Amino acid sequence: MAVENVIWPRYLDASITRSDGRRVSLQDAIDDPEVDEIAEAVQQIGYDAVIEHDVAHPREWGTNGRVVVKGADDSSKNDLVQAVAAYTHILRE
């Protein structure tokens, strides 16, 4: 069975504190991450990404979507989120 990981934009958002759900260091975090750029970073790493626009994180009121990463069974979720943050920085340059 294939592993599916979910990456919410708040995992990478510089305006969110660690206790509120950010999963990367402030240095690696980005301002206002979008699901489209997260999905592009996931694809750059080599995994399939499915964007779900009409879902909201349980701690948020507005819907800003999430990215479902398929086939990432060879890495931990933390490694995946760290790599996505690094590639998102590269894509913004």
Image: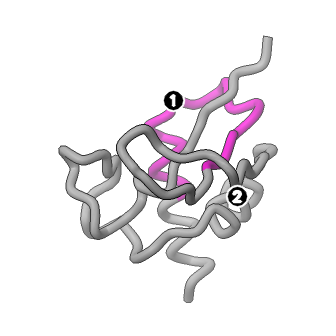
| Viewport quadrant of the N terminus | top right
Query: Residue 52, position in %: x, y?
Result: 72, 48
Q: Which residues are magenta?
A: 66-84
Query: From mark 2 to mark 1, how far is it between C-alphas?
Result: 17 Å
Query: Residue 77, position in %: x, y?
Result: 50, 33
Mark 1 falls on what kind of element?
A: loop
Give the residue pinned by disc 1. 76
Residue 28, label in figure: none
Q: Residue at x 42, y 38 (%)?
A: 58
Determine the image quadrant of residue 6. top right
Mark 2 falls on what kind of element?
A: helix
Amino acid type of the residue tagged 2 in the rendering: Ala
**Badge 2 vs badge 1, beta-carbon distance below 8 Å:** no
The local crowd at label 1, few if under 14, some if 14 to 19, many if 20 or more residues have their Cα within 10 Å, is: few
Give the residue pinned by disc 2. 39
Q: Residue at x 68, y 51 (%)?
A: 54
Position of 24 with respect to 68 (left or right) is left
Q: Is residue 1 above or below residue 66?
A: above
Q: Is residue 36 above or below residue 80?
A: below
93 inside magenta stretch: no
Q: Nearer the viewer, mark 2 or mark 1?
A: 2
Position of 45 with respect to 77 (left or right) is right
**Residue occupying the far front of the picture:** 61
Amino acid type of the residue tagged 1 in the rendering: Ser
Determine the image quadrant of residue 35. bottom right
For the residue pair 1 and 33, the one nearer the viewer reads as: 33
Q: Residue at x 49, y 64 (%)?
A: 86
Which callout, 2 or 1, points at the residue further toward the start of the chain? 2
**Residue occupying the far bottom of the picture:** 93
